[in-house]
Amino acid sequence: MTENRVRRVAEQIKKDIGGIINFEIKDPGISGLTSVTDVSLSKDLRHASIYISIYGSDDEKEKTLQALERASGFIRSEIGRRIRLRYTPEINFILDNSIEYGAYIEEVIKSLKKEENGGNDNGPGKNS
């Protein structure tokens, strides 16, 4: 299987699963701020790792992952219906903290800049 095809199928699965999670699954355990950040497919397209970013507390993240695992059969059947493949991939959800980590890094940078400017948020060369 060519890498280009695997990448295209992964991108389509990412779009479809994002729509399914946000608009079709009615499970109250799924947090409102859930997004698919990446999809990793095996070369034979039989296994998919779905990276999910969930905004909320650790408890909300755990409940959302459990709800997604419960709904994985439905999600897999929807993917099989929407994307014509010989085999519908097995789905495995993985929590992705990269967005949360990026926000943390941004806050650290802001605090360093604030310290550098002597506690002044305006920065050098800006008028108060």
Image (tube, rainbow, N blue to C red):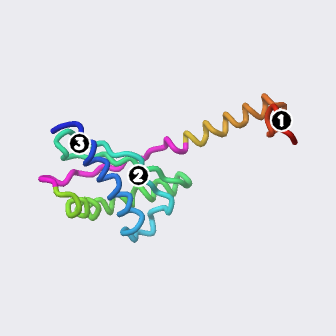
Q: Amino acid at mark 1?
A: Gly
Q: Which residues are magenta?
A: 85-100
CA–CA distance in space, label 3 to label 2: 17 Å
First along the sequence among labels 3 and 2 = 3
Give me the residue at 55% from left, 40% from top: 101
Picture quadrant where residue 115 is located: top right
Instruction: Give 79 or 27, whichever is nearer the viewer.
Output: 79
Dot 2, crowdedness within 10 Å: few (<14), some or many (≥20)?
many
> CA gap, disc 2 to disc 1?
37 Å
Which residue matches tag 2?
A: 36
Amino acid of disc 3: Val
Instruction: Point out which mark residue 119 bears.
Output: 1
Q: Is residue 107 above or below residue 62?
A: above
Element assignment for label 2: strand
- Quadrant in which the C terminus is drawn: top right
Q: Position of residue 42 (x, y in %)?
A: 22, 40
Rendering quarter of residue 120: top right
Which residue lies most toward the left here? 86
* Above or below: residue 17 compared with residue 39: below
User: Which residue lies under the disc numbered 3?
Assistant: 6
In which quadrant is the N terminus drawn? top left
Q: Is residue 92 above or below residue 125?
A: below
Out of 4 and 102, give the one closest to the viewer: 4
Q: Earlier in the sequence, mark 1 or mark 3?
A: 3
Q: Residue 92 at what x, y percent from top left?
A: 30, 49
